[in-house]
Amino acid sequence: MYRPVNKYFKPKAPIARTNQLIKVPEVRVIDDKGEHLGVMPTHEAIKIALERDLDLVEVSPNAKPPVAKIINYDKYRYQVEKEEQQKRKSAKRVEVKSIRLSVRIGQHDMQTKARQTDQFLSEGKKVKVEMVLRGREKANIDYAFEQLTKYLSLISTPNTTELAPKRMGGTIITILMPQ
């Protein structure tokens, strides 16, 4: 029977080596109660773990000798996954908002866009300001930079420039971030 291969499926890699997958000759062993049993050959540590109906899990493989715990591997994996979830949840994501301007923008429209930029900066978001140049506007680049400078002077919220105004093809880009 033909089964299509799901190219998006990635099997989870094991979190830590366990029991027979530990290939080092000796390990520092900590038992399920947190007591140090000392440094011993790996095969003896595995034998102790199996007598207690638990697994020998390599917790710190880079230590000399590697540290292994006698614990239930499923519970250990569950705890590690929960910690990773908590880290992802607490990681701060900075949102980048975009404002597009034209060289021919009117004064009132420029003030409206500046108020919008002030609002984004006061919410703690980065703002990417793009001035799009079309056709013959690309020939008068000095006027475009002048307009952008005028726009930036209208912004009242304290900010720092992460990226100074810079021409990239047919657009001039600058990135502002709150102070």
Image (cartoon, rainbow, N blue to C red):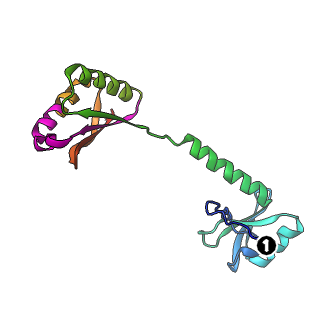
Q: Is residue 167 left or right of residue 83?
A: left
Query: At 36% from the left edge and 29% from the top edge, which residue is drawn?
Result: 121
Q: Quadrant of the N terminus?
A: bottom right
Q: Residues within 10 Å of mark 1 (few under 14, many from 20)?
A: many
Q: Of residues 107 and 33, which is closer to you in this image?
A: 107
Q: Of residues 109 and 115, which is closer to you in this image?
A: 109
Query: Mark 1 — residue?
Result: 45
Residue 132 shown in magenta: yes
Residue 148 shown in magenta: no
Query: At 88% from the left edge and 64% from the top edge, which residue is drawn?
Result: 53
Residue 158, position in %: x, y? 29, 27
Q: Is residue 127 left or right of residue 88?
A: left
**Mark 1: amino acid:** Ala
Q: Quadrant of the C terminus?
A: top left
From what the image shows, is residue 25 above or below residue 66? below
From what the image shows, is residue 114 above or below residue 71? above
Residue 60, position in %: x, y? 64, 65
Start-end of magenta stretch: 124-147
From what the image shows, is residue 75 above or below residue 173? below
From what the image shows, is residue 150 above or below residue 176? above
The image quarter in which residue 18 lies: bottom right
Residue 22, position in %: x, y? 71, 74
Residue 139, position in %: x, y? 11, 44
Q: Is residue 139 left or right of residue 61?
A: left
Q: Is residue 140 left or right of residue 153?
A: left
